[in-house]
Image (cartoon, coloured by chain):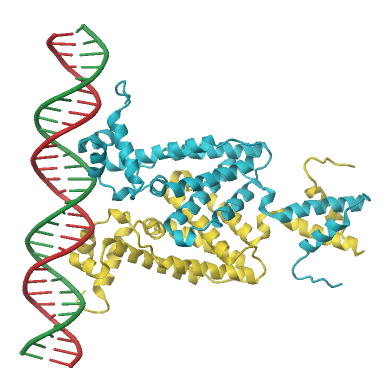
Chain colours: A yellow, B cyan, C green, D red
Amino acid sequence: MGGTGDTSTARERILRATEELLAGKDALAISTRAICDRAKVGMPEIYRQFGDKQGLLTAVADLGFERFLAAKRRNPLTDDPVADLRTAWDSHVAFALRNPYLYRLMFTPTGEDKPQAIKEAQAILLKAVERCRDAGRLRMSPELAGRSILSANVGVCMMALSFPDLFGDSETSPAVRDAVIGKVTGDEREDSRIGMATVLAQALVGTLTGAPTSTGDLDRLTRALRPPGADSGA
Amino acid sequence: MGGTGDTSTARERILRATEELLAGKDALAISTRAICDRAKVGMPEIYRQFGDKQGLLTAVADLGFERFLAAKRRNPLTDDPVADLRTAWDSHVAFALRNPYLYRLMFTPTGEDKPQAIKEAQAILLKAVERCRDAGRLRMSPELAGRSILSANVGVCMMALSFPDLFGDSETSPAVRDAVIGKVTGDEREDSRIGMATVLAQALVGTLTGAPTSTGDLDRLTRALRPPGADSGA
DNA sequence: TCAGCTCGTTATCAACGATTACTAACCATG
DNA sequence: CATGGTTAGTAATCGTTGATAACGAGCTGA
């Protein structure tokens, strides 16, 4: 690498070196000397650029958020905003499993200065949620919906990373995903009984207003909706 | 192992001192010397008892789990196992907010040796979930239900601790709680429309079989269940 | 040319985790 | 009481780490 001063080479090299070392160790287990060795800079450079080791780690976390959000932005939007929420959830989990140490640095910061980019992540999630609201498929404020989804999403990832043998299965994430997203959006995947109830209600309205109704559907639905205690009254 | 007749004072003092220091700082920000000072022991004692600083921290985490589970066990059981699940969730959150650094040490361990007591926590949660199953109020395997609840619960706590200004509100936790527990148990709190649909179904059955029905309830329910697109025409 | 800035090198400090060697107290058994 | 084995306490030390200070090389713009 013969080039001397291109773009801010020193800062970039330090950031890259930290990211690379972060692929194999925890953030706090990385020594500043190892970073300087790999980045071919002297130790004071870190402190001139980032003021602190914490500052460097925070910068790396923010940079990780940037890539994280870039991947999210690349996700194509379909005409089903709720399905897009599920896709975003899955890509979030995939990112966490692929970059465990970086993910922990991003979402469980140690010091006082937290990464600012999480606000951006929240903003993107908010946009996705607002698309659901605009489609009439949101049952609470977008802010609360976004916080709920992100909290649960992070929880699934953290448990899978911290206790892989107990929480590393592939069932938990979809289960929690569908629970939270279903609750937030009122999507029918949440509970098939809602779909049945809707058909039933339309049938009821039709019955009361004298419109024709499919008797077979009604039979099945009334059987499905009958409370457990009441046995067949026939 | 067992040691002398007295409870092993040195080990106890070290654990207590670490816990006390853990009330004010992060686990990794605590120096072994500060622990030894407060515990009135020499430095080798830590390594004789726990082999490592990580070992000490893991022991403290396990001890934290013990108190955490003891508090959970003190929660009286009602005749509503689903309500008990919600109570357990809330006590979990309260513990996390009260002992932030200890909680992070328990649920996001840094090293290779994870605290064993989380299995016990999972076992207790599993029992609570099995009570729901025995009451006919569980829609999935108890294991998956327990993992889902615990993952989401930890996520809510971690986000509240890591980003208190963005996620420290008091709405997110109940929202995620009711979403996950509702999905897992199929409880009616999950979606009020199910309750309405049940009433509606009963009314429909009554109507079709010629039984009397309250017209006011039906009016309100049909209005609530009418799909968004269909306005009050026709 | 000179001042001013960024960048890099070396040397250094204080604190930290961890270890060694040695000593003092304890406790059951003979 | 004397024994040996375990546990606890003291002091000194090693290697590493985060963080600074001092200094100089190189370039920039006036």
On screen, residue A130 above or below B117: below
On screen, residue B176 versus residue A43, left or right, reads right
On screen, residue B81 above or below B158: above
On screen, residue A193 versus residue A102, left or right, reads right
On screen, residue B184 versus residue A20, left or right, reads right
Q: Residue furthest right?
A: B210
The total of numbered circles placed on residues is: 0
Decide if residue A221 is in sight here: no
Q: Where, quadrant-wise, is the N terminus of chain A in this rendering? A: bottom left
- Picture coordinates of residue A108, whole percent (x, y): 40, 56
- Picture coordinates of residue B89, whole percent (x, y): 55, 46
- Picture coordinates of residue A39, whole percent (x, y): 23, 66
Decide if residue B182 is in sight here: yes
On screen, residue B224 above or below B86: below
Foreground pick, A167 / B146? B146
Tell me where residue A146 sits by quadrant: bottom right
On screen, residue B77 above or below A152: above
Q: Where, quadrant-wise, is the C terminus of chain A in this rendering? A: top right
On screen, residue B218 versus residue A191, left or right, reads right
Tell me where residue B214 sits by quadrant: bottom right
- Picture coordinates of residue B92, whole percent (x, y): 50, 45
